[in-house]
Amino acid sequence: MPPADKERTMAWGTGASWRRDTRPGVLVIMFGLAIVGFGALWAMLMLLPSLISLDHTLSAAIRSLAQPTLDAIAVVFTTLGGFAIMGSLSVAVCAWLLWRGLRPEAALFAGTMTLGPALGELVKALAGRERPPLEFARIVPPTNLSFPSGHALAAFLFFGTIVFLLFTVDETLSLRTKAIVSAICVLFAIAISMSRVYLGVHYLADVVGGWLLGGAVMTFTVGLYISVTSGRTSGR
């Protein structure tokens, strides 16, 4: 058995253990909650002026924290979450996974980082939500629409998938180390996402929408990954 398949077998167990596994049910519930949450937020932004007012108020409160040091930090994080760097990092991760012989994991990462942004752009076009006024922006604002935040979506998917794979295929790091790396990933995802609100190019609801859509996409792709890899290992 190749090392990569052996690792997956050890991680997920035999076919019998898979049938007793509760993770598929948990993923279905998480997918449903993310979809319902995203749909509800989208609908409320279209129908409830009071929510829009609250969104604007909270976003203004975040922008009011502005100071030169925070501006510089926010620009670093927002640049990190941009297409050029996030795309390059995704290619690098996929290449490393392929080099390790982890082809299903590379497919999971590539599929997640492709499907998510594509859906995000589709929803932007359908939702048609305008970005904050130009006078709020402290960087050159993007010209596309606002909901959901592409940075928040990509950051959720990138770091979320990293954490999933860390606990799925890595057997060299201690649980404590994995927990520390996971916490750093969460902090980076939050920092990238919130930098968009701080810099005045997104509202807070756009970020929350990106996270919810990211949750739906990731539970879907992870579910496919588990289904495929469990079938491969149980047949050996």
Image (cartoon, helix red, strand yellow):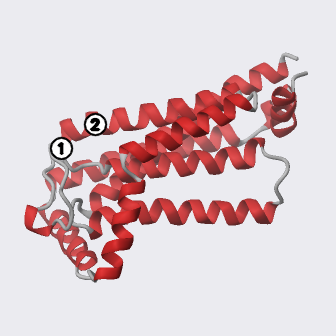
Which quadrant of the rendered structure holds the C terminus? top right
Percent x, y for residue 179? Answer: 71, 63
Q: Which of 52 and 119 is in front in this view?
A: 119
Numbered badge on residue 144: 1
Residue placed at 48% from the left, 59% from the top?
Answer: 189
- Where is 138 relative to 224, above or below? below
Q: Relative to residue 160, is residue 207 drawn left or right?
A: left
Q: Relative to residue 224, is residue 17 drawn left or right?
A: right
- Where is 1 relative to 117, above or below? above
Percent x, y for residue 87? Answer: 44, 40
Residue placed at 50% from the left, 35% from the top?
Answer: 112
Q: Relative to residue 53, is residue 159 drawn left or right?
A: right
Which quadrant of the rendered structure holds the N terminus? top right
Numbered badge on residue 121: 2
Counting every numbered tag in the picture gives 2
Instruction: Report if the CB atoms under discs 2 and 1 are less than 8 Å apart.
Output: yes
Residue placed at 18% from the left, 46% from the top?
Answer: 145
Q: How many residues crowd mark 1 within 10 Å: few (<14), some (14–19), many (20+)?
A: few
Percent x, y for residue 218? Answer: 52, 41
Residue placed at 30% from the left, 62% from the top?
Answer: 196
Q: Relative to residue 121, is residue 172 drawn left or right?
A: right
| Secondary element at tag 1 | loop
Amino acid on which disc 2 is placed: Glu
Amino acid on which disc 1 is placed: Asn
Residue 21 visible, this angle:
yes
Q: How many residues crowd mark 2 within 10 Å: few (<14), some (14–19), many (20+)?
A: some
Q: Distance between the residues labelled 2 and 1?
A: 9 Å
Question: Mark 2 or mark 1, which is nearer to you?
Answer: 1
Q: Nearer the viewer, residue 172 or 32?
A: 172
Residue 31 visible, this angle:
no
| Secondary element at tag 2 | helix
State which tag comes first along the sequence, 2 or 1.
2
